[in-house]
Each structure stands twice: as C-alpha cells, then as structure tokens.
Amino acid sequence: MQVRVWNKDHRDHVEMFKGDQVTVPGRGFILLDLSEANQFLGQFTPIKKDGHGNHLKPKMLVIEKPVDGVLRALESVESICMLCGKDFGTKEALDVHSNKEHPAAKTTQAFRQKAN
C-alpha cells in the first residue's frame, strides 16, 4: 500500500535510506510503501543545533495513510478537516464544522497569522 510521506518543514529533508539519498521537498511529499515509510521515519538522524540550541534541520515528517484504500487527490484536500480527517465536500461545510467542533484551532491559526 502506497502512502505519502509529508515534510511539514519549509526546507528540503535529505537523508540516506537503504543506501540511497532520499529527498522530501519542503512542504511536499514522496510516495513510499507503508512498511518503508515506517522504517524511513523511524530511522535515527543526528540532531544538529546552532549555538543557541535551536534545531537547524528538524525531522518534521508525517505519514498520510489512504482513506478507504485510496489516496485523495490534492485538489480535494481543502474540504477535509485536518483535525479529525472527515471530508465535508465543500469548503463552506468544512468552515461550519470547524467553527462548531474546533473553535480553539481557529483562534490559534488567527494568532499565528497575526504574529507573522
């Protein structure tokens, strides 16, 4: 079963895996078999920090598993709740759900946008 391995960081993640150099683009994904994806995420990578203790290259990878055996097309992602995984069909229906079920997430998102 193929899964997407997403890189949540804005920088490319480059790592050796089974003798090959694997690059996961920043805020992008690669396709791997589920067992290989679990091995790839579980493999140790040394932590690199600067003089202040900040991570220089964090490993921010996640696995997106298929829903009903099928990976969704990227165009339909805007109607899927990222917190509970349900598909609402339209962005408007998703907004209604988000306001009702996840009000704290909206507040956090607005705060982050204001800070940037």
Image (cartoon, rainbow, N blue to C red):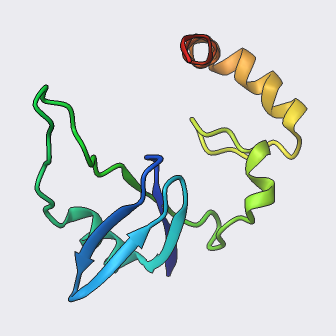
Most foreground residue, 40 or 33? 40
Question: Does residue 86 lie above or below 52 as drawn?
Answer: below
Q: Which picture quadrant has residue 97?
A: top right
Q: Give the answer, above or below, for where 70 lies relative to 84.
A: below
- Residue toward you, 114 or 30: 114
Residue lying at 50% horizontally and 81% vertically, measured from the top left: 1
Question: Quick check: 8 left or right of 86?
Answer: left
Residue farthest front in this picture? 51
Number of marks: 0
Q: Is residue 59 left or right of residue 115?
A: left
Direction from residue 106 to residue 28 in the image, left or right: left
Q: Position of residue 25 (x, y in %)?
A: 49, 63
Closer to us: 21 or 104 = 21
Residue depicted at 77% across the width and 45% down the height: 78
Is residue 115 depicted above or below 54 in this figure?
above
In the rendered view, tell whether residue 94 sits above or below residue 109: below
Q: Where is residue 19 shown, x and y percent of the image?
A: 21, 89
- Name the one closer to the observer, 58 or 50: 50
Which residue is at 79% across, 43% downward?
79
Quarter of the figure with the C terminus: top right
Q: Is residue 54 left or right of residue 26?
A: left
Residue at coordinates 22% horizontally, 38% vertically from top-left?
A: 55
Q: Quadrant of residue 22?
A: bottom left
Residue at the extreme bottom of the image, as rendered: 19
Rendered location of residue 18, percent (x, y): 22, 86
